[in-house]
């Protein structure tokens, strides 16, 4: 007799790239002190791992995934080559920390997800929709305002640096519109 896998009740989707960037800039003062013996900087890895350990320890989520951007261009660059062309490259000291946080995620038995041609936001939105369709509640751990358009009765966001929960009410306070209209406001603002 086979049993079907248990449906998730609560899914955590962590914006790994976004959280790592914030962790890096939060620990700028310690960047010279926090290095491995070979000189590899670890300041952002330290904060990221500390945050991930706290999330894993404090959550009731039965599924957790850390979702990362890939180094390569996305399908949007094929459509519009200038997509994010004005964005600065990641700081040199941050680049070697990306594989280390993936290792840290796996060491904590947390799934690490990335897919060539897609941004973490794309994957988070897809996984959130799929989890909702299965009846799960979703918490998106990110400070990225682009993801606020996903907030609804089943999807909340948590700002990992402020440790605050973001629901529809907080989105309305920030943008003056319901979450499903955030993309319209951002488009009008040129964001």
Image (tube, helix red, strand yellow):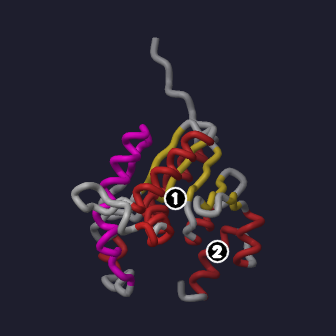
Ranked by sequence position, the earlier of labels 1 and 2 is 1
Could you say which is closer to the camera, residue 120 or residue 28? 28
Image x and y of residue 15, in percent: 49, 59
Residue 11 falls in which quadrant of the image?
top right
Instruction: Please give left or right for residue 162 compared with residue 13 in the image.
Output: right
Q: How many marks?
A: 2
Q: CA distance from mark 1 to mark 2?
A: 14 Å
Could you say which is closer to the camera, residue 169 or residue 127? 169
Residue that extends furthest to the front in the rendered view of this protein: 33
Q: Is residue 190 magenta?
A: no
- The residue identified by callout 1 is 125
At horizontal 47% and vertical 67% (from top left) the residue drawn is 27
Residue 87 falls in which quadrant of the image?
bottom left
Image x and y of residue 136, in percent: 62, 42
At horizontal 42% and vertical 62% (from top left) the residue drawn is 44
What crowding class fits label 1: few (fewer than 14 Cα within 10 Å), some (14-19), or many (20 or more)? some
Q: Secondary structure at mark 2?
A: helix
Image: 183 above or below 2: below
- The residue identified by callout 2 is 182
Residue 70 falls in which quadrant of the image?
bottom left
Per the rendering, the mark at residue 27 is: none
Could you say which is closer to the camera, residue 46 or residue 145? 46
Q: Is residue 93 magenta?
A: yes
Instruction: Please give left or right for residue 119 compared with residue 166 in the image.
Output: left
Image x and y of residue 106, in percent: 37, 42
Magenta span covers which residues?
A: 87-113
Residue that extends furthest to the left in the rendered view of this protein: 38
């Amino acid at each position: 007799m086979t049993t079907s896998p248990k449906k998730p009740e609560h899914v955590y989707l962590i914006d790994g790239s976004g959280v790592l960037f914030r962790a890096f800039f939060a620990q700028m003062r310690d960047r010279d002190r926090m290095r491995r013996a070979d000189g590899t900087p670890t300041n952002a890895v330290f904060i990221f791992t500390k945050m991930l350990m706290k999330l894993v320890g404090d959550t009731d989520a039965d599924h957790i995934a850390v979702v990362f951007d890939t180094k390569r261009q996305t399908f949007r660059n094929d459509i519009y080559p200038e997509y994010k062309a004005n964005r600065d490259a990641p700081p040199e000291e941050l680049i070697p920390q990306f594989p280390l946080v993936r290792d840290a995620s796996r060491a904590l038995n947390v799934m690490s997800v990335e897919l060539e041609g897609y941004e973490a936001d794309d994957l988070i939105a897809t996984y959130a929709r799929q989890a909702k369709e299965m009846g799960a509640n979703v918490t998106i751990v990110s400070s990225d305002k682009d993801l606020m358009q996903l907030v609804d009765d089943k999807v909340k966001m948590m700002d990992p640096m402020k440790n605050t929960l973001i629901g529809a009410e907080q989105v309305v306070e920030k943008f003056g519109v319901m979450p499903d209209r955030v993309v319209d406001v951002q488009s009008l603002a040129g964001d």
